[in-house]
Amino acid sequence: MEVILKQDVDKVGKAGAVVNVKDGFARNFLIPNRLAVPLTPANLKKMEGEKAAKSQQLEKFKLEAVRLSERLSALSLTIAALSKDGEELYGGIGAQDIAAGLKEEGFEIDKGAGDL
């Protein structure tokens, strides 16, 4: 039986691939667990439409990331902190300080989203 995989399945194939599997495996495992759909013209057209939409969304995300990268590369950020004799900091400059500095420059970020 030929099916279209909706998700990656170990030793079978990747999402979007058309694979030929045994009838029982498809009917008893892949289709009930929503890992695959039977190969029909309607399902194939639907999968192609989903691929196109995902590709378009990925392209939009990449363009947005490039724009953000350009803005960040042109940015120079200065954060004031107390120091001993102008060389050693009393404390450190943390993620919250960097997030506050970026917010002043017009960048909205989540200060708890990962390590900076």
Image (tube, grey):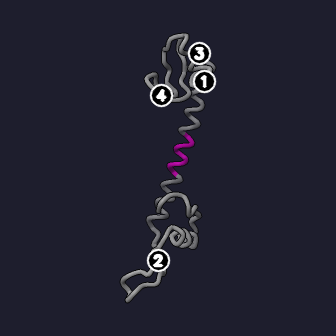
Q: Do the residues bearing badges 2 and 4 touch, measured as CB atoms within 8 Å?
A: no
Which residue is depicted at the point 56% across and 61% down? 112
Q: Which residue lies furthest to the bottom in this view?
A: 85
Nearest to the eye among marks 4 and 1: give it.
1
Q: Distance between the residues labelled 3 and 2?
A: 61 Å
Select label 3 or label 2 by which is in front. 3
Mark before the other along the chain sequence, 3 or 2:
3
The residue tagged 3 is 28
Specify the label residue 33 is tagged with. 1
Q: Is mark 4 on a helix, strand or loop?
A: loop
Q: Name the residue under label 4.
A: 14
Structural crowding at the residue carrying mark 2, measured as other residues with C-alpha within 10 Å and reported as few (<14), some (14–19) or many (≥20): few
Q: Is mark 1 on a helix, strand or loop?
A: loop
Local packing at callout 4 (Cα closer than 10 Å; few below 14, some 14-19, many 20+) is some
Q: Where is residue 68 in the image (x, y as percent from the top left)?
A: 51, 59
State which region is magenta.
56-63
The residue that label 2 is drawn on is: 78
In the rendered view, tell whether residue 91 sits above or below residue 11.
Answer: below
| CA distance separating discs 1 and 2 | 53 Å
Image x and y of residue 73, in percent: 44, 64
Q: Main secondary structure of the magenta part?
A: helix
